[in-house]
Amino acid sequence: MIANADEIQSTLGCDVAKDTVTLFDSRTLKTLTVSNTTAALKAALKPYAGRTGMLAICEATGGYEDELLRVLESLAIPAHRADAARVKAFIRSCGTMAKTDPIDARHIAEYGLLRAKSLPRFQAPEPQDARMKLLVARRADLVAMRVQEENRLKAPRNKPIAREIAGHVAEIKRRIDAIDRQIEATVSGNRRMKERQAILRGVPGIGKVIAPVLLALMPELGQIDRRQAASLAGCAPHPRDSGTYKGRRFATGGRRQLRPLLFTAAMAASHSKSHLAVIYRRLLAAGKSKMTALGALMRHIVVIANARLKEYEAADARLT
């Protein structure tokens, strides 16, 4: 997963826009702006194909970086897709106030050069995994729209247009049902995905809605340790201590899309007949608040899911 950090001697910072990509070579200190198209990117990046000890870095831009990453992969150039928030924080720490594409590309290259030891290589997802992620994201958007429209339907001032709003709510529900069928068909057509989902649905609190979301948004499950799993899901409590002060720990960070779903899973598990319900009642009896106890259940659910999928991965590896 980690790009061979000891061998990385130079980086290629790539600032991606909708129509252009600005490249900064940390070795030659040269900057080049090219069109964000396959042909232009291949022509610009081909000279780097044989260079050893180099890593290309770009920010996640909501999809505009996909063409660049495809070209880098076709040329066997190792790449890292960086968290945009981390890169922006790094640029601020450098004291840079100006913002242009060449300046950003240079800082992205510096970011990669300084943090090469901890930057994983980008690996293109399998087509079915990519499709599942898109379907899950679209379903989440539709659910958010449905909630907004249902809230508008309840508003007293919207009574004159209630019929129109109700019709839109019904249409959104039909689209959600259609997405659910597509998700089910995608899982059914992939043996590994189907088996992994069956394992997830065996974890208390995880049902048919949450299982595919975990598959899509946490593909690392089964390949990481328990602490990494809890941290990725945003369920790991972080200390807030200073000197003799011991602050209350809060679970922050992680993939924000997962927390509401895991909270729902924890609520279901707390009312089930599983051992997680016993843990929940024990925490309440010990004086913990309901939110703290549910947070602990969220963490348990992710850790259990990770452990069971790790067993599956090990067994699958032995069979193949």
Image: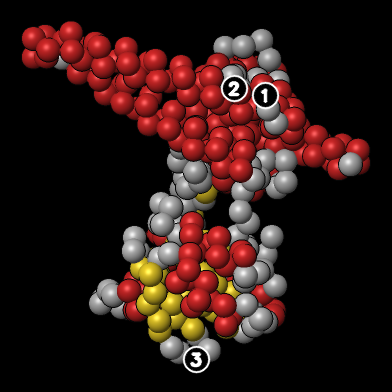
Mark 1 and mark 2: Cα distance apart in space: 6 Å
Q: In which quarter of the image is the C terminus?
A: top right
Q: Is residue 284 above or below residue 120?
A: above
The structure's colour scheme is: secondary structure
- Place residue 93 in its image quadrant: bottom left
- Place residue 56 in its image quadrant: bottom right
Q: In this view, does 303 lie above or below 88?
A: above
Which residue is under mark 3? 28
Q: Is residue 217 above or below residue 200?
A: below
Q: Nearer the viewer, mark 3 or mark 1?
A: 1
* Residue sitting farthest toward the front: 39
Amino acid of disc 3: Thr
The picture places residue 217, in percent across and down from the top left corner, at 55, 39
What residue sits 55% from the left and 60% below the top? Answer: 70
Which residue is under mark 2? 184
Contact between labelled residues 2 and 1, with CB atoms less than 8 Å apart: yes
